[in-house]
Image (spheres, grey):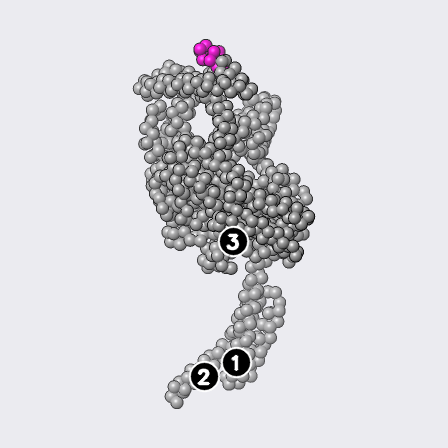
Amino acid sequence: MQLLQIDFESHRRGRVVGIDLGTTNSLVAYMDGLRPKVIPAPEGGVIVPSVVSYNESGEFVVGERAREELIRRPERTVYSVKRLMGRGLEDVREELTLFPFHIAEGSESVLRLQLGERTFTPPEISAQILRQLKRNAEAYLGEPVEQAVITVPAYFNDAQRQATKDAGRIAGLEVLRLVNEPTAAALAYGLDKRRDGIVAVYDFGGGTFDISILKLHEGIFEVLATNGDTHLGGDDIDNLLLRIALEDVASEWGVDLSADSEAVQRLRRRVVAAKEQLSYARKTVIDFEYRGRRYQRELTRELLEKLILPIVDRTLACSRDCLRDAQLAPEKIDEVVLVGGSTRIPLVRSAVERLFRRRPHTELNPEEVVALGAAVQAGILAGHVEDSLLLDVTPLSLGIETMGGVVSKLIHRNSTIPASATEVFTTAVDGQTNVLIHVVQGERELARDCRSLARFELKGLEPLPAGMARIEVRFLIDANGILNVTARDLRTGKQQEVEVKPSYGLTEEQVERMIQESYERAEEDLRERQLREARLEADRILQALEKAKPHEAYFELSEEERARIEAAENELVVAYHGGDHLLIRAKIEQLNQATLRLAEMMMTTAVRQAIEGDKS
Amino acid sequence: MSHFRQTVECWQCGHPAEHSLFCRYCDSLQRPTADYFRFFGLEPRLKIDAANLEKRFYELSRLLHPDRYLRKSPTEQQYSLEATAILNDAYRVLRNPVARAEYVLRQAGVESLEPRARTLDPALLAEVFELNEALEEFRGGDRSVRPALEQARERFLAQRGEIDAGLESLFERYDESRAPNVLAEIRKLLDRRKYVQNLIEQLDRELATESTDAATSD
């Protein structure tokens, strides 16, 4: 038994990184000793824009380079894909008018995006971002990275979490834990600044808003309540400004640019730049040039604030609800931590300060703090950080649909996870052999107003008179906030088969297939790299041989020795032009053996010359 | 829930495990027990020291949480998940006096009587009747009934306070006597509390929608 234990330990000893998979930007961090550190991207900086482009030669481009493609190849490039994670066609209709998502035909069951000639699901696109971060980490750390902690908005539902986990698997990462973004921020903050007290984390990012209230006590980070909106972020502010600018341009130029994706992307950039400038300046100019025409408009901070007030008010309403759920008055909050790029906006800061009646903390970089916290959690899971522990909650109530479409709540929102509930089901008709359970997530009374999660089918029941069967179903939300369902026949005590039909997102088979595809592609990548490396080495030895041939030592070799070298050289050149890296390696080795004495002799000559040189 | 002793063996080393969280021979985590009080190592009492409960919750979280078992065997990982779910469920129930009492009653097999009109006392019934009329007018736009609704809310809050005080002394009596008739009395009071609580929540909802309208206009 001891051997088995040792085996598990060794299997899981690899490096675990922490990843902030953001709507706009993504980052990867790791534990450098006991301190979390962000890993730089090869092209500089630590931020990888969450933009993915699929080029004509079938390669993915991610990050800063893909951002350039947004303008050149908008139809092959996608940003803010996080908004589509775990969602259905119906959910995203509204988004489609504002985002250049090209939804592929036949997206009724699973949402697919058209990028050039191929289609991809949102988890596959996210997987490309994760893969890039994985590569960055591997290049920086100089070792393979196969396990990760990935952060998600606290208010993400089950389907959105599952989609994120799927993305990780497709990227070749074992997702050890999904951590809520505000909780991760609190972890980084708590480790750094404060050990005990009540902390509110106000996380206003590119696409999502979260508010979490935590109790910190001797290394335990206990989330008391969380609230938020997974479709409220800086994107919404950008869209607001973009719409105004498009209207302006339409009336000034008499041209409606909204269908011209290149123009829209260029204008969006100008608008976002103006928004960002207004965090520091009182006024700025939106300056937009396109095809020889120019549009300029002064934008004051005052006007921006007027425009975004309703958005900020929505975050405050969530924050008040969160305080109420935590049963705390605003005065009871000891510290407020700001997270996310949108908290750089002065109006946001002052609104938060007014609500909590204290100046929020801004000394931690709001763009990095989530990734740093994810790295800390990775350290906890790897056993490197011993005294800290996260106790998180489920953001939404979990229930089942009962008679008349009414929801019976089983696990209430803000319950500490893992959390569970059991319910006994029976049959309604004589001889019924299966029972369908519709599980929903949300706070509303009627199932149709909640989020449909999945339908669980209990199959193969023993045919009995109606009401005689007694099946105990256990709903368990794990530490990732993901639902697991098991069932047991109370009469026989036997485990009951449960078939899961997710309402949104991918089935297990679909994920498996995507992983398979990505492996095949990864194998291709690997073979190509090995071939390239083998050729490089062949180049080196062939060049060295060229240089050695005029050397006197080469003529001191026997005829036979020279013939063997020539033969080995020819064989290597032939192998070089083939595609088999193993053959190249074998021929390199053969040439090495053949030139062994030559090398020795050259070395001796060199030494002799050096000694003689010293004498003279 | 039956309390008879079963002989349980440690899944890892085969020594008798005696319903403890960890095997005392090989220290591996055992399949968790589902009894909330026993899980916390507490006597099944209706009065509980909240500070001690919280302290114990943190201690057990540190011992059992899945974050601590990622490098252990799949069996222990599964037990850790199940144990932590029970721990969290138990903590949620035990720290709330009403949920705790409901749990004890359910374990003792004392079912709820479903407090419909016939089981309630006539005075409360008359008040509820009046309240419904006032709510009807309020929803119809008659703001003049607002003070009456607020007063009703105050009265229900006071009633809830009385019920809670009554429960408190019944809890004490039960912990001393363990008498089934005390549980029956608690049952009645809990049903009444649930009814009053629903009224308070309904009033809160109605009055809240009104006051947010006022707040946005200033």
Tell me which corner region of the image, top left, top right, bottom left or bottom right, holds residue B88: top left
Q: Range of the magenta residues?
A: B116-128
| Tag of residue A48 | 3
Q: Label 2 belongs to which residue?
A: A605
Q: CA distance from mark 2 to mark 3?
A: 54 Å
- Label 2: chain letter: A
Residue A567 x %, y %: 59, 76
Q: Position of residue A254 (x, y in %)?
A: 68, 48
Name the mark nearer the viewer: 2 or 3.
Answer: 3
Q: Residue at x 55, y 75 (%)?
A: A542
Q: Residue at x 56, y 32 (%)?
A: A450
Closest to the observer: A377 or B27?
A377
A479 vs A523, nearest the viewer: A479
Could you say whether the residue bearing mark 2 is in a helix, strand or loop? helix
- Report if the CB atoms under discs 2 and 3 are less than 8 Å apart: no
Q: Of the residues under marks 1 and 2, which one precedes in the sequence?
A: 1
